[in-house]
Image (cartoon, rainbow, N blue to C red):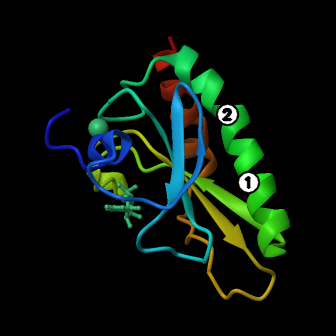
Amino acid sequence: MKDCIFCKIIKGEIPCHKIYEDDNFLAFLDIQPIAKGHTLIIPKKHYNTFEETPSDLLEKIMPVIQKIGIALKKSLAADGFNIGLNNGQAAGQLILHTHFHVIPRFNDDGLHTWPSVKCTEEEFKQITESIKAKIK
Ligand code: 5GP
Ligand code: ZN
């Protein structure tokens, strides 16, 4: 994709701090890390969103994400890590090229978890049924 920053990184037209590469995927440090070691893992083939990414590629990317998470944890002496993906603008996706975030976490890093919303039992039931009906 011509104007995609991540495609340019894959082609070497924009530099990155590469930490891993194989035939299908590239992993490099995020330029604005939430924590030191914050890594992005992307398919080399361009897909705008997670939704549009073929499931066979997603099957292959999971072990890579796991490998990188473990390496981040060991190299940074982290206590854990978050795996994240923003799907769509509303979810905070800024770069329209599918990418997973792996963010090292420390017991005392002060990064707070997301807030929760109130949900009645009726809503839980109704939402469960409506989601189930849409699973293909
Ligand atoms: P999104 O919000 O789309 O899930 O995340 C995009 C991420 O890409 C952001 O965390 C941002 O810091 C990172 N990013 C944007 N441009 C570049 C770049 O040119 N190089 C690198 N390494 N990361 C980038
Ligand atoms: Zn791209």
Q: Residue at x 29, y 51 (%)?
A: 95
Q: Are marks 2 and 1 in contact (CB under 8 Å)?
A: no
Local SS, label 2: helix
Please determine whether, in this image, residue 44 is positioned above or below residue 119: above
In terms of depth relative to the viewer, which is nearer, 135 or 130?
135
Residue 12 coordinates in the image, percent (x, y)? 33, 46
Q: Give the amino acid type for the residue marked by disc 2 in the picture.
A: Met
Q: Residue 112, located in which quarter of the rendered image? A: bottom right
Tell me, for residue 69, which label it has, or none.
1
- Is 114 on the left-hand or right-hand side of 89? right
Q: Residue 102, located in which quarter of the rendered image? A: bottom right
Tell me, for residue 62, which label it has, or none.
2
Q: Residue at x 32, y 30 (%)?
A: 46
Q: Give the amino acid type for the residue marked by disc 1 in the picture.
A: Gly
Judge the density around disc 2: few (<14), some (14-19), many (≥20) Cα neighbours within 10 Å. Answer: few
Residue 90 coordinates in the image, percent (x, y)? 29, 53
Judge the density around disc 1: few (<14), some (14-19), many (≥20) Cα neighbours within 10 Å. Answer: many
Given the current orientation, which residue lies at the most extreme top position? 136
For marks 2 and 1 on the same chain, the one whose residue lies earlier in the sequence: 2
In terms of depth relative to the viewer, which is nearer, 6 or 21?
21
Q: Residue at x 27, y 45 (%)?
A: 8
Residue 33 coordinates in the image, percent (x, y)? 49, 73
Residue 123 coordinates in the image, percent (x, y)? 53, 44
